[in-house]
């Protein structure tokens, strides 16, 4: 009986030692890459540009990053177009635009925007059930530097 317990203990110890060594095979660089290359529930890769690419990266420059729709009555819908220019040195690709809630819906074009060209992101806001002061955040993910920018839609629903 003691021999069986001893053999079982040695087997468990040997198996756990093998699993630990496999995990150590991963280099420290791979851990960093995994923490930087993340995807959200949409499957869009929100990758941070490599520092070597930063000098030539596209730059997303909005005319205004905030739109104040002032005061509206509950149930009204607001639409606004955020205009931008690629002021960088390479084509700009917007990979995703996400709103913080279902009452705000962004629309954008996925085609590349060449340096010096303009583009836009249209945002709709449905105020039904949204009484009081509002501040909606729309997050833009792209290959620009910085890779993530926020747009703001604010006002008051009466």
Image: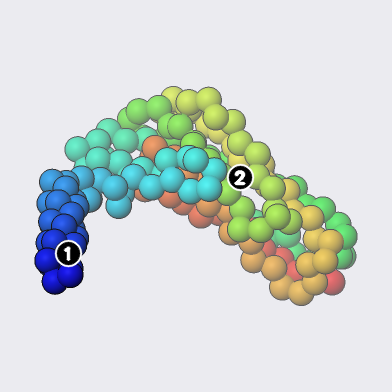
> Would residue 9 be visible to someone looking at this image?
no
Point out which mark residue 36 bears.
none
Q: Secondary structure at mark 2?
A: strand
Mark closer to the observer (2, 1):
1
- Residue 98 rendering spot, x and y as whole percentages: 58, 49
Total marks in image: 2
Q: Residues within 10 Å of mark 2 (few under 14, many from 20)?
A: some
Residue behind mark 2:
82
Q: Residues within 10 Å of mark 1 (few under 14, many from 20)?
A: few
Q: Residue at x 84, y 71 (%)?
A: 158
Q: Judge whether 125 appears above or below 135 on screen.
A: above
Residue 63 vs residue 109, the one in the foreground: 109
Which image quarter: residue 47? top left
Precedes in sequence: disc 2 or disc 1:
1
> Would residue 32 be visible to someone looking at this image?
yes
Q: Residue at x 70, y 55 (%)?
A: 102
Q: Secondary structure at mark 1?
A: helix
Q: Judge whether 88 appears above or below 14 on screen.
A: above
- Residue 83 rendering spot, x and y as whole percentages: 58, 41
In the image, taking residue 63 as reference, residue 86 lies left or right, namely left
Work out how far the residue at label 2 is from the one at label 1, CA to CA, in angstroms.
72 Å
Q: Quadrant of the N terminus?
A: bottom left
Residue 29 vs residue 109, the one in the foreground: 29
Residue behind mark 1:
4
Q: Residue at x 13, y 61 (%)?
A: 7
């Amino acid at each position: 009986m003691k021999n069986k317990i001893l053999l079982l203990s040695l087997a468990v110890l040997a198996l756990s030692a093998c699993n630990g060594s496999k995990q150590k095979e991963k280099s420290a660089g791979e851990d960093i890459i995994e923490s930087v290359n993340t995807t959200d529930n949409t499957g869009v890769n929100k990758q941070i540009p490599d520092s070597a690419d930063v000098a030539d990266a596209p730059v997303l420059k909005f005319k205004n990053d905030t739109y104040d729709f002032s005061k509206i009555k509950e149930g009204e819908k607001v639409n606004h177009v955020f205009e931008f220019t690629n002021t960088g040195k390479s084509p700009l690709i917007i990979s995703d635009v996400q709103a913080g809630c279902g009452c705000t819906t962004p629309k954008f074009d996925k085609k590349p925007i060449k340096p010096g060209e303009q583009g836009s992101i249209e945002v709709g806001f449905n105020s039904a059930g949204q009484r009081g002061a509002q501040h909606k955040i729309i997050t833009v993910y792209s290959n620009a530097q910085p890779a993530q920018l926020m747009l703001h839609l604010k006002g008051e629903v009466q």
